[in-house]
Amino acid sequence: MKPAALMALVLLAPPALAQDQDAQRSAWRLKRSVSAAEPGRLVALPLEPELLGQAQAEGRDLRLLDAAGVEVPFLLDRLEPREARVSFAGHVVAADARRRQQSFVEVDLGTLALFDTLEVQVAAAEFAKRAQVETSEDGASWSTALPAASLFARPWGGGFVRHLTLELPAPVRARRVRLTLDDTRSEPVTVTGVTATRRTALDGARFEREAALLPLGSAAGISRWRLELPPGIPFDELTLDAEDRLFARHARLAEVREKGGSSERQVRGEALVYRVSEGDFAGSSLTLPVAGLTGGERVLEVVDGDAPPLRGLTARVSGPRSRLVYVAPEGPLVLYYGNRVVRAADYGLEPLRARLAAAGELPASALGAEEPNPRFREAPPLQFAARPGAAVELSKYRFVRRVGVPVREDLYALTLEAADLGLLRPDLADLRLVDAQARQVPFVLEPGAREESVILEREALEPVAGRSRWRFSVPRREERERSALPVETLELHLAEGFFSRAARITVPRPDGRSGEATAWSGRLERRAGADAALPLPLRTRAATFTLEVEDGDDAPLTVSDARALVRVPRVAFKAGGGELRLLLGDPQASAPRYDLAALRDEVLAYSAVAVQATPAEASVAHRRGWRELLGQAPPTLLLWGALLAAAVALVALTLRLAGRPPEAS
């Protein structure tokens, strides 16, 4: 997607007006100025890991304000380093283990390939060899690609080390690979195959920071250090180093947090780290992958066993850089962060994340020095008490979901399911949350809070006049009729790799009349080699969808999967524990009105505790009224009922006329 298209979509996000920035953002502890950029340009603001260490995880509390105090919509983009890998699996075409003091194996990759890494497969469970790598394009003329390297697999340091990857100093183009192995100190081994790989680094950037290690002592053969880093700095790799030239240790990174008056420890990464710099086998692996950090104290644990602790141990962390992408307004901006309770802002830009790579290089704006917010004050989540509202008549609601809420009073959020929308009116006016006494629990409704994918049932229909036809249906819920859902996008997965055909999607008329209405028309297109799903924007409410494709003289397309993407709402409310019930399905209900609506922005600004609900079930308290009975009656029953009523009326009128005396002439 071009930057201009991205910019147009970003500008669609609604702003929030403000007056005094620091006063309005009093729950934000820190701020930094942002240099002005050319207005109307899509720009990127690089964020240092130290800044993110002061913010919530995933930057949930970041807010960007212009000179008028208006929030500027942005997308937090992580510059994940990516690597394209093309591999070629070779098969052994020649081998000779009878040579004195060395053996060789020749592998054919099947094609002329460009590669820079070789992964060797060896049948032996334990061995150590020196190896030389030669390559050839034709199998006749050979050149040395790697004069000496080590291959080994052996138990060490309480684990089993496999060092079977050979890194070439430069990419090589060849079809044949020959390995010569030194057998002077051990028996020959059998090489069963070699995989050649070309690794190409794509766009992305990483940061690296040295991490000071504070010794915490040793006990039971385990040495411990605390990583001295800002608590929230986001990293996904920890690399160790030591003065020792020969070592192998099991290392792990644990995170320790205080919870409920006690310490909670969780391992966030572990690996066997080793280094060999001389002898028959040489190599190293010193990096631990790390995941799931939440901001607690980071403790490095190294299992020494009976060996002495590593000398001169050092550590550094690394991770992907992050940036804010936004359309520059007039004048300078201010970035606020350091709010412990606020929830992430939702500007509706998440679908653009995958398209940023196609936007190319973006001009960068710069951050000023960090400043404290002079109006900062710690704000607990919404100090008002949770008071129940008016009672509701349970008999009017057809369905119920049970919601469990923890004992303490807090702000909670419940995200509905796509199936719930089929039980509710399109305007969601018949949604209620009640306590055990059937009293309403006031809530704030956030429509379209999350996108849910619904797998549709699919059925191939008889073709008509050269058009193949498919029917997709919302799954039935128990034995009830299929419920119409507000579908934003229909996502099709097609088995064919290349096609371009006219098509349309029709749905039953929403007004109940016979026939169908066109919800989408255009072309189904896929270029050769692509395998992504085809998204078709519908923005309609229906339970069944019919796809018609103009096939011409081609074979019909094969639909392997069809999904409906539905935007589901979330309700945020304050409650103090106990079981609540979510009521759905009263066609005559009017939209609820709560005082809490005046605090809508405040409610949605805080981090609510997510709660779950049981699946929807028929309410035992429901009593159907005459309107509902008529609305659910089959059309044939209504027709015969009308005819019977007309017949009764006609008989009554006939009898009345027959009993009247004739009029005098």
Image (cartoon, rainbow, N blue to C red):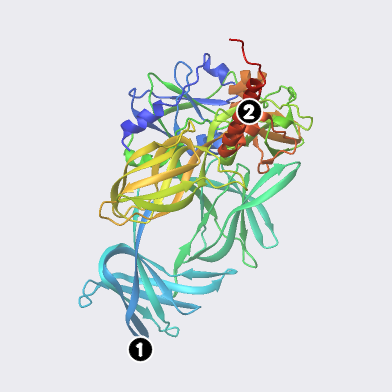
Q: Quadrant of residue 404?
A: top right
**Element marked by disc 1:** loop
Q: Seen in the image, is 309 located left or right of residue 147?
A: right
Front-most of residues 292 and 543: 543
Q: Looking at this rendering, what residue extends furthest in the top direction?
A: 665
Q: Residues within 10 Å of mark 1 (few under 14, many from 20)?
A: few
Q: Amino acid at mark 2?
A: Val
Front-most of residues 599 and 20: 599
Identify the residue at horizontal 54%, vertical 47% (top origin): 475
Residue 649: x, y in percent?
Answer: 62, 26
Q: Disc 1 and disc 2: Cα gap in Å?
A: 117 Å
Q: Amino acid at mark 1?
A: Arg
Q: Residues within 10 Å of mark 2 (few under 14, many from 20)?
A: few
Indicate the quadrant containing the N terminus: top left, top right, bottom left or bottom right: top left
Is there any visible trace of residue 274 in the rendered image?
A: yes
Determine which residue is flagged by label 1. Answer: 100
**Element marked by disc 2:** helix
Residue 651: which disc? 2
Indicate the quadrant containing the C terminus: top left, top right, bottom left or bottom right: top right
Q: Is residue 358 above or below residue 20?
A: below
Is there any visible trace of residue 572 in the rendered image?
A: no
Q: Seen in the image, is 542 located left or right of residue 120?
A: right
Q: Seen in the image, is 33 located left or right of residue 6?
A: right
Q: Is residue 184 above or below residue 270?
A: below
Q: Is residue 529 above or below residue 192?
A: above
Mark nearest the camera among 1 and 2 is: 2
Residue 263: x, y in percent?
Answer: 72, 46
